[in-house]
Amino acid sequence: MKTEINKKLGKRIQYLRLQRGLSQEKLAEAIDIATTSLSYVETGRGFMTLVTLEKLAKVLNVELYEIFKFSSMTTNEEMYNYIISKLDIIKNDDEKIKMVYNLFKNLL
């Protein structure tokens, strides 16, 4: 059953996993659950036991309470909109535009 807390928790776990460069398979293996179970949790359709949450915190190198720290999450759309708004501000500043251009060029 998808509840609001399940959806938030799933997004938070996915966010932390991706921040650490882990695939679902690697994380699921590290916390001793099936990949499908982790997928269900990340999509808000499932939940973990406290024991599994403790393993998750250890593998992700966070305190247990940090897994439930939903307010610090930023969506891709929010990050994108923030970047675009800042680009609008610097669009007439040749030096800053060159710096951002070189940053993007080296990232991609």
Image: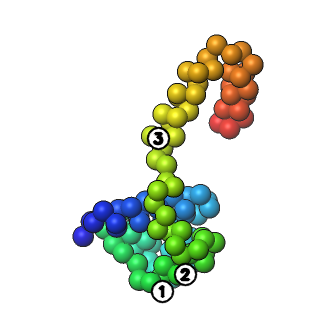
In the rendered image, the vertical position of residue 70 relative to residue 47, given as above or below: above
* Three-letter code for the amino acid on which mark 3 is drawn: Glu
User: Is 108 on the left-hand or right-hand side of 76?
Assistant: right
Which residue position is annotated with label 1? 51
Label at residue 78: 3
In the rendered image, the vertical position of residue 61 relative to residue 74, given as above or below: below
Residue drawn at (39%, 61%), measured in percent from left and top?
8
Label 3 sits on a secondary structure element that is helix
Residue at the left extreme of this rendering: 1
* For the residues bearing labels 2 and 1, Cβ distance under 8 angstroms: yes
Q: For the residues marked 2 and 3, what is the alpha-carbon distance in whole angstroms?
A: 30 Å
Whichever of labels 3 and 1 marks the residue nearer the N terminus, that label is: 1
Position of residue 31 measured from the top left corner of the image (x, y, whole percent): 53, 79
Position of residue 77 measured from the top left corner of the image (x, y, whole percent): 45, 40
Q: In this orientation, does residue 94 appear?
A: yes
Residue drawn at (41%, 66%), measured in percent from left and top?
9
Q: According to the image, what is the colour scheme of the structure?
A: rainbow
Residue drawn at (52%, 73%), measured in percent from left and top?
65
Position of residue 53 measured from the top left corner of the image (x, y, whole percent): 48, 79
* Three-letter code for the amino acid on which mark 2 is drawn: Lys
Q: For the residues marked 3 and 1, what is the alpha-carbon distance in whole angstroms?
A: 33 Å
Which residue position is annotated with label 2? 55
103 and 79: which one is in front? 79
* Three-letter code for the amino acid on which mark 1 is drawn: Val
User: Is 63 on the left-hand or right-hand side of 42?
Assistant: right
Label at residue 86: none
Residue at the bottom extreme of this rendering: 51
